[in-house]
Amino acid sequence: MTVRSTAGAFRSPFYLKAARRMSQKGLLNFFYDLWREYGDLVRVEMGRNRFYLAVHPDHVQHLTVTHRAKYDKRASYDDVRRFLLGNGLVTSTGDAWRRQRRLLSPYFTPRSIEQFLPIFISEAQRTRKRWEQLATRGEPVEMINEMMQLTARIILRALFSLTDEREICDTAHDVDYMISFVAFVQMSPIRLPLWVPTSRNRTYLKARARTHAFVRKLIAQRRAMPVEDYPNDMLSKLLLARDEETGAPMSDDLVLDEAITMYFAGHETTARGLAFAWYALAGEPEVAAKLHDEIDRVIGDSDPTVEKLKEMPYTLQVLKETLRLYPPAPFYARDAVEDDVLTGEPIKAGTRIMLTPFCTHRHPDFWREPLRYDPERFSPEQEAARHPYAFHPFAAGQRICIGNNFSLLEMHVLLSMLAAQFAPRRQPGHQLELELFGTLGARTGVWMHIVPRQA
Ligand code: HEM
């Protein structure tokens, strides 16, 4: 199939009518059906709400690489900016973004993030103990929630060196509430201002006030210490970073925004990726056997090292195939800042375009039998032969996820250490229904039993 030169169009003059259809089908299925019905570029008009859905890998390349100067994160990111992340790296734009990206990139190279390996390992060991108990109790667990607790602890240790259980729980709880608040605001057709004392608004405002006070206290404690005593964590790096042109440090407000950004971006997506990996493995005995074979051969029950991880390429293929079929960030947006033409379709400045790893990763022109789970797709030969933008779970171009190396290393360690001892099983009768709620989720959760490998 060649890329269509003009867009298919879905029009619904009455927003509420389309919104009803959307909520009946679920947002994920709604978008997926639009793509299947109208093609790789869809102009969606729902009342006054207009945007494009762009699915073809050529579109991904155009929007994020070849014509990237014409697209930025503007109005589409206003809610996240306002209610959660301020001017942190995910939501900042233009020169402010460029400066921050330049400042933070050195801390996210494959080499730099190796310093977090001991945290990944010790948290995997802690989860092994927890899973031993869960296995004897035989109760099912909701895997997204289970993985979220694990990755939240990891990112809070990596960010702030937190070890106090109470502080970890309270901080994770408050920021997770702020995240769910933004997802709710983005989905609701009617918006109430924050001063209206609904219980949701009040809980959000309290969670935000507590989080900001907590992070500001940590910043003040660090600033009061001699620099030689700073712990080796991301907060210290944010405080010590200096702009290479002006030599200026970040303001406390910006450090706060970046810290919340790293927490937000750095645990939820990774947790979802891992949860879906367990789910997929439980339904694919041959893949699981090959994975177990590799793990047993290379690390057995011992702790992985960076060198040992390199000897476990199949485990990484399993993770990539999971990110293909279950991309934790199934959609992301760009706003046109100038007029443009996208494969023949005129795009006016101000137009929102939704890019969709969820659909691109299921495109039959680039993935044979796209719904089949098959880690062999990520063998070096198959990867080299594929369109370079057919796989974009971390976005693409200059705004590609800065934490991609961090999360792949984290997932590689956690999956290999836990799969060395456990093979979670799906709860009988449980049906997975994927759903979009900010990130990729499941309507009734991902329920599984923790089972030791030998059982
Ligand atoms: C499986 C795990 C992850 C997935 C699927 C993922 C996905 C993404 C995607 C799709 C974007 C682009 C968002 C957009 O354009 O709106 C992004 C950006 C970002 N991610 Fe991740 N991410 C993951 C893990 C992480 C981790 C572990 C961190 C930090 C430790 C992180 C930090 C960020 C940041 C700071 C950005 C903004 C980068 C910029 O605009 O310069 N992410 N991520």
Image (cartoon, helix red, strand yellow):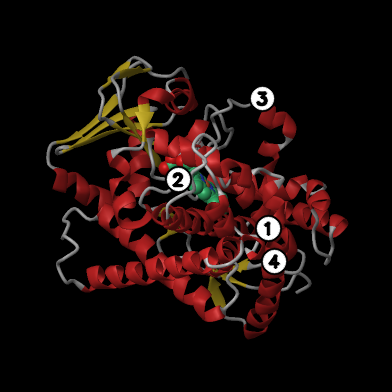
| Residue behind label 4 places its C-beta within 8 angstroms of ligand 1 | no
Dot 1: what SS? helix
Amino acid beneath label 3: Ala
Q: Nearer the viewer, mark 3 or mark 4?
A: 3
Which amino acid lies under the numbered mark 2 shown in the image of this protein? Leu
Q: Which residue is at the far left?
A: 14
Question: Residue 199: percent from the left, percent from the top?
Answer: 22, 74
Residue 359 seen: no
Observer-nearest residue: 451 or 230? 230
The residue at which mark 4 appears reads as 423
Give the distance between the C-alpha atoms of the residues marked 4 and 1, in whole angstroms.
26 Å
Give the amino acid type for the residue marked by disc 4 in the picture: Ala
Which of labels 4 and 1 is toward the front?
1
Q: Nearer the viewer, mark 3 or mark 2?
A: 2
Q: Secondary structure at mark 3?
A: helix
Is the CB atom of the residue marked by disc 1 within 8 angstroms of ligand 1's nearest atom?
no
Mark toward the viewer: 1 or 3: 1
Question: Quick one: 70 or 251, which is closer to the camera?
Answer: 251
Marks 2 and 4 sit apart, C-alpha to C-alpha, by: 37 Å
Mark 4 residue element: loop
- Is residue 91 shown above or below 237? above
Amino acid type at mark 1: Phe
Drawn side of residue 426 relative to residue 339, left or right: right
- Which secondary structure, mark 2? loop
Confirm if mark 2 falls within 8 A of ligand 1: yes
Instruction: Kindly identify the residue that appears in the image at 49 percent across and 48 percent down.
Output: 249
For label 1, the residue is 116
